[in-house]
């Protein structure tokens, strides 16, 4: 999909309208930083427009973290002159084509997709109020057929289409430039299917692997390692610096983000990045944040025994949410730690920083920083100082360290979690 060159001359503003429900996955990132395929939602918008975002708009609590992680300003003055403002939850990026000066595009339900207008008309406005201002200041309102992500399962369900688009969108970038479409060599194993298999020239594939591209493309990024006897079924992608363990099965519609360890059976799932599931165990139709460690033998259910719709709870202060799906597994927030043999039931949401080491199945909703072990008399919390020791130790294994901005957000989340769940005290 080529870039929309006429739009590349306009400063690009990507905004989080704070309307999606992504549970703990947006504790440490704006919705436009969620991974959708080879790229994040923001990166896909940038590629189709043809330029890097000039400014990002998100809720104030995340401004410092988002600016730090992306290198893009999140506050200050607007870019001068006419700008293109795009809703960061946009999945169908082709909906931006041909937008004209003074136009605001909305979905049939009235959600703002994008707008093109003079920045001087916007003034000082917070993320949640920006859509209303864009509508008020526009000269033309156009309804378009566009899809915006409203929950994690919107991203995982669309993986087949997203990956097909991304192989075109990112073709001339460093992400794909060093890749070539090829079959496996005899010393690597066998591959088959009519869809493309793109393998970076720095990727390593062990013997007796199988790549099945009969139902979708497969992409292996820079410095990816696929260990012997692994099976990868397209559409799927394994991104930069990730390792697929021996005898692994990556089923269709799986995206393993950068610098992850993937093992066992994984399907219909997105790993945001920097997370580990190195051992046997099943994980299906799920979304995994960053710095998550999943112990050996951990399994999740992604289908109810009744074959009914999965209903989930995404946050401690929210009600139940209908997924409109029969298949949905788990949401694992950033820095979640699961001990060996953990069992996750259908539709489980595990909050940021939770530590689980119990033999019985985990509750369908686990609050942030929960400390759950066998024999616990009441819910406990991971003490924040102990949590940070663990977080720093895991991040150091990837040569990373939590910044002051990230630690400040984590600390505020911890304070709110302890205040919300009144039973139990910190764990020593």
Image (tube, helix red, strand yellow):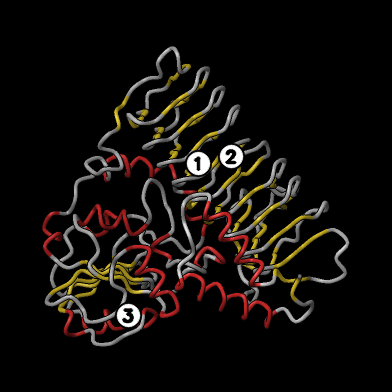
Residue 334 seen: no
**Numbered circle sitting on residue 150:** none
Instruction: Pick whichever of labels 2 and 3 is earlier in the sequence.
Output: 3
Q: What is the quadrant of residue 91 in the picture?
A: bottom left
In this picture, residue 261 sits left or right of residue 166: right
**Residue 243: x, y in percent?**
50, 36
**Residue 394: x, y in percent?**
57, 54
Question: On screen, 236 above or below 80?
Answer: above
* Residue nearer the viewer, 282 or 306: 282
The residue sitting at 11% across, 58% down in the picture is: 6
Residue named by callout 2:
266
Check the picture and name the quadrant holding the C terminus: bottom right
- Say if mark 1 contacts mark 2, CB within 8 Å: yes
- Say if mark 2 contacts mark 3, CB within 8 Å: no
**Residue 268: x, y in percent?**
54, 43
Residue named by callout 1:
254
**Residue 256: x, y in percent?**
48, 43
Residue named by callout 3:
130
Question: On screen, 166 above or below 232?
Answer: below
Q: Secondary structure at mark 1?
A: strand
Q: Residues within 10 Å of mark 3 (few under 14, many from 20)?
A: many
Instruction: Pick whichever of labels 1 and 2 is earlier in the sequence.
Output: 1
- Say if mark 3 contacts mark 1, CB within 8 Å: no
Q: Secondary structure at mark 3?
A: helix
Spatial distance from mark 1 to mark 2, Cα to Cα? 7 Å
Spatial distance from mark 3 to mark 1, Cα to Cα? 34 Å
The residue sitting at 46% across, 45% down in the picture is: 259
């Amino acid at each position: 999909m080529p870039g929309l060159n006429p739009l590349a001359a306009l400063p690009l503003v990507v905004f989080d309208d704070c309307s999606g429900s992504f549970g703990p996955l947006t504790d440490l990132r704006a919705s436009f930083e969620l991974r959708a395929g080879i790229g994040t939602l923001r990166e896909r918008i940038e590629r189709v427009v043809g330029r890097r975002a000039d400014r990002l708009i998100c809720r104030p609590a995340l401004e410092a973290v988002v600016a730090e992680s992306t290198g893009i300003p999140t506050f200050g003055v607007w870019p001068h002159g006419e700008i293109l403002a795009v809703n960061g939850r946009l999945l169908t990026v082709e909906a931006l084509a041909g937008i004209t000066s003074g136009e605001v595009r909305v979905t049939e339900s009235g959600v703002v997709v994008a707008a093109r207008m003079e920045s001087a008309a916007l003034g000082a406005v917070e993320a949640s109020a920006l859509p209303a201002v864009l509508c008020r200041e526009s000269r033309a309102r156009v309804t378009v057929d566009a899809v915006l992500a409203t929950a994690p399962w919107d991203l995982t369900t669309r993986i087949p289409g997203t990956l097909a688009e991304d192989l075109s969108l990112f073709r001339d970038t460093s992400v794909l430039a060093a890749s070539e479409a090829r079959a496996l060599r005899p010393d690597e194993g066998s591959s088959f299917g009519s869809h493309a298999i793109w393998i970076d020239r720095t990727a390593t594939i062990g013997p007796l692997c199988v790549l099945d591209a009969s139902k979708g493309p497969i992409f292996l990024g820079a410095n990816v390692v696929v260990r012997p006897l692994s099976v990868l079924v397209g559409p799927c992608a394994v991104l930069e610096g990730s390792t697929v363990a021996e005898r692994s099965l990556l089923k269709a519609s799986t995206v393993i983000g950068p610098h992850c360890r993937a093992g066992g059976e994984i399907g219909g799932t997105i790993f945001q990045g920097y997370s580990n599931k190195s051992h046997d165990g099943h994980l299906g139709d799920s979304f995994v944040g960053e710095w998550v460690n999943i112990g050996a033998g951990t399994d999740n259910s992604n289908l109810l025994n009744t074959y009914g719709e999965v209903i989930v709870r995404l946050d401690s202060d929210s009600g139940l949410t209908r997924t409109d799906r029969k298949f949905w597994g788990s949401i694992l927030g950033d820095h979640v730690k699961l001990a060996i043999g953990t069992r996750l039931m259908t539709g489980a949401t595990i909050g940021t920083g939770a530590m689980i080491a119990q033999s019985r199945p985990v509750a369908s909703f686990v609050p942030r920083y929960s400390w759950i072990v066998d024999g616990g008399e009441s819910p406990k919390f991971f003490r924040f100082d102990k949590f940070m020791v663990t977080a720093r130790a895991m991040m150091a294994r990837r040569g990373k360290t939590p910044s002051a901005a990230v630690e400040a957000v984590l600390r505020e989340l911890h304070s709110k979690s302890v205040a919300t769940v009144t039973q139990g005290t910190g764990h020593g």
